[in-house]
Amino acid sequence: MSILRETSVGIFLADEDGEDVLLPNKYCPKEFKIWDKLKVFVYRDHEDRKVATNIVPKILLHDFAFLKVIDMSAAGAFLDWGMEKDLIVPYSEQRQRMEVNRWYVVYLDVESETDRLYASNKIDKYLQNDDLTVKEGEQVDLMIIAQTDLGYSAIINKKHKGLIFEDEIYQKLDVGDKLKGFVKKIRVDNKIDISLQAIGYDQYNDANTEKILKILQTNEGVLDLTDKSSPDEIYQRLGMSKKAFKKSIGALYKQRKISMDKTGIKLL
């Protein structure tokens, strides 16, 4: 927003449509000029007035986040989202009764009638797999939302729901983690299988071979791992599966970029 005018309580900012909002003194930059542009977050304060702040919230409108309940009231649960005024989850938007000091995945929405922000723990109503916007092999943004008997459920591109099977996981995952992944398979019922490794030999190999090359370059050209090394040791040191490691060093060997012996691999 652009700086419009200065007052005793702060500076007023205006958007492209001419609507203005107050940025209180405590958030004002020390030096500024009229019409300078500032990046701010706008929400309603304790008196229900629109106010701007330069504090970055932990969740933005129409997005998901993993937040902690810090208080309860007759109106609902209140979340710490990094702002002075806590974020409410009305009881009607709680999938199960929330508890203080516990963490939940929530979605940030706005009431159309009151223009007030609120969070919802009923995240399934904000996800749909009927009309998919992704395809197999595509890289996607993920947010881990639950651990299941089969693996981990994840939100895909803030729109869809997918599953990472346990045998596809070679790293520690926690609810709330945000990371990149790949669409491995779209089933006939539009359920989506997700892989944390790139799909297809070329994609899969390029990322891992690049990683091994960088490690070799920063480690005097040697790496004491072989295709006989244990899967646990390979994962702990490289963050990839043994299968991915063997494919990558095989490709590097064919390209004559490395040599291999029983002690490890060497950069040529």
Image (cartoon, grey):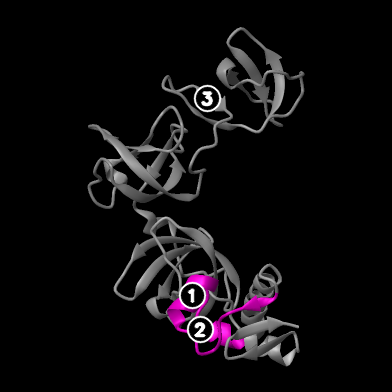
Tell me whether circle 3 and circle 1 mark residues in contact (CB < 8 Å): no
The quadrant of the rendering that contains the C terminus is bottom right
Q: Is residue 236 magenta?
A: yes
Instruction: Give, as a three-letter code, the residue at label 2.
Output: Lys
Tell me the quarter of the picture where residue 264 sits: bottom right
**Distance CA(mark 3)–CA(mark 1):** 50 Å
**Distance CA(mark 3)–CA(mark 2):** 54 Å
Residue under label 1: 235
* Relative height, residue 115 to residue 92 (above, below): above
Mark 3 and mark 2 lie on one chain; the one further toward the N terminus is 3
Tell me whether circle 3 and circle 2 mark residues in contact (CB < 8 Å): no
Residue 215 in the image: state x and y as whole percent.
Answer: 65, 71
Residue under label 3: 50
Viewer-side label of 3, 1: 1
Residue under label 2: 242
- Given residues 41 and 208, the one toward you in this image is 208
**As drawn, is 25 to the left or to the right of 80?**
right
* Relative height, residue 229 to residue 103 (above, below): below
**As drawn, is 208 to the left or to the right of 100?**
right
Query: What is the span of residues highlighted in magenta in the rendered image?
Result: 221-248
The outermost residue toward the top is 8
